[in-house]
Image (spheres, rainbow, N blue to C red):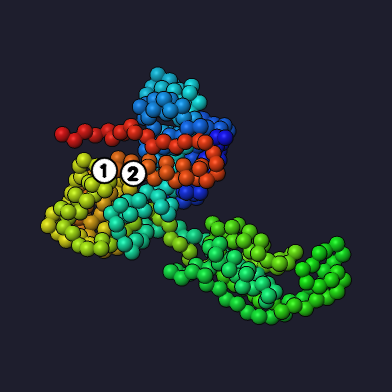
Amino acid sequence: MFANAQTIVQWMEQLAPKSMAVENDRIGLQLGSIRKDVSQVLVALDVTDEVVDEAIRLQAGLIIAHHAIIFRPLAHLQTDTPAGKLYEKLIKHDIAVYISHTNYDVAVGGMNDLMANLLQLTDVKVLETLQHEPLQKLVVFVPETHAQQVRAAILDAGAGHIGDYSHCSFNLSGTGTFQPQDGTNPYIGHAGKLEEVKESRIETIVPKSIKSRVLQAMLKSHPYEEVAYDLYPVDLQGTAYGLGRVGKLKESVTLQEMAERVKSKFAVPHVRVVGDLTRPIRKVAVLGGSGSRYVRHALFHGADVLVTGDIDYHTAHDALAAGLSIIDPGHNAEKMMKADVTARLQALADERGTQTSFHASTVCTEPFQFL
């Protein structure tokens, strides 16, 4: 049994929800149909002519890529242009293209976390916060005999996280009243008789993204036929999501040593460096792709160096004057996403018993040559 392409897209959106994308970013299904089963999926950084040829050889019905193939609304679809030829080839071979870009950058475990992990940064925080996870207060009433059981189910499902503390809840004892009506099958009491039961009121915090999972765990563990619970919006800020990461090295290294580490860990043959190569580096900011406008964010966080791509001449001068070093491994360093996304999607497919295979593209899409 092969996985449906629409299901695979849903898996990808679990890893990198579309709601996390920067406004106006070109993400999602850009070409073709996902209403089909696919035996092979290709994961790529860019969708070039060579990458499409690779997909054809693999008989892939879907390409999941990081960089969009359609950046702005099309004025025409002429197949004698480079872009038109690419679209035509994809359509003729029934290959759909799905893009996960800034939502993958922002997501937990996505591009920027990959960079931070490869450099072994600790105490990692978001470089630029774009949004916070919405929180709700869950209140549920449980007979005291089952309070521990229901509380454990809710908290084990992920509710009750406040900062670095987990399994947080407030509990209050009281008396609940109810009168079962005809046709009911009450756990406690009898139809037509008013009942009074010693109950616990359990309160905890629930992130919106896992609300369904928490409620399902609560309902499954609760003994009542009809569960009394409330959900309230709260003004507390949940987990911060955003672009870039900033963290610390376990031990200081020189800028020269840091540059060599970036080359090795990011598997790039060349980096550009701004700053004194003997300078000690301890706090590091990272951002995948083009990071010129994040110099001030790195400075605000007290970073010694910013590791990012596509630094222009004037930005380099500004950073140098402000005392911030820069290591530029190039935009193509984002190729690290191919192995990560491939492995995570393959794991989901295997868990569900499908025979669909995922492949990290082996095509080098680096447009520059280093002489």
Which residue sits at x=24%, y=34%?
368
In the image shown, does 139 or 341 lie closer to the viewer? 341
- Quarter of the image with the C terminus in it: top left
Which residue sits at x=20%, y=42%?
270
Where residue 339 sits, quadrant-wise, is top left
Residues packed near mark 1 inside 10 Å, few (<14), some (14 to 19) or many (20 plus): few
Horizontal relation, residue 23 to residue 257: left or right = right
Count of all numbered marks drawn on residues in the image: 2
Residue 190 screen position, x and y as percent:
84, 71
- Asked if the residues shown at circle 1 and circle 2 are in contact, with their CB atoms under 8 angstroms apart, the answer is yes
In the image shown, does 90 or 345 lie closer to the viewer? 345
Residue flagged by tag 1: what amino acid is it?
Answer: Ala
Where residue 219 sits, quadrant-wise, is bottom right
Residue farthest along the top direction in this orientation: 80
Horizontal relation, residue 62 to residue 296: left or right = right
Q: Which residue is mark 1?
A: 267
Q: Which residue is mark 2?
A: 336
As measured in the structure, the alpha-carbon distance from the residue carrying label 1 to the one carrying label 2 is 8 Å
Q: Is residue 348 above or below residue 203?
A: above
Q: Is residue 96 visible?
A: no
SS under mark 2: helix
Which residue sits at x=55%, y=67%?
155
Residue 104 screen position, x and y as percent:
42, 47
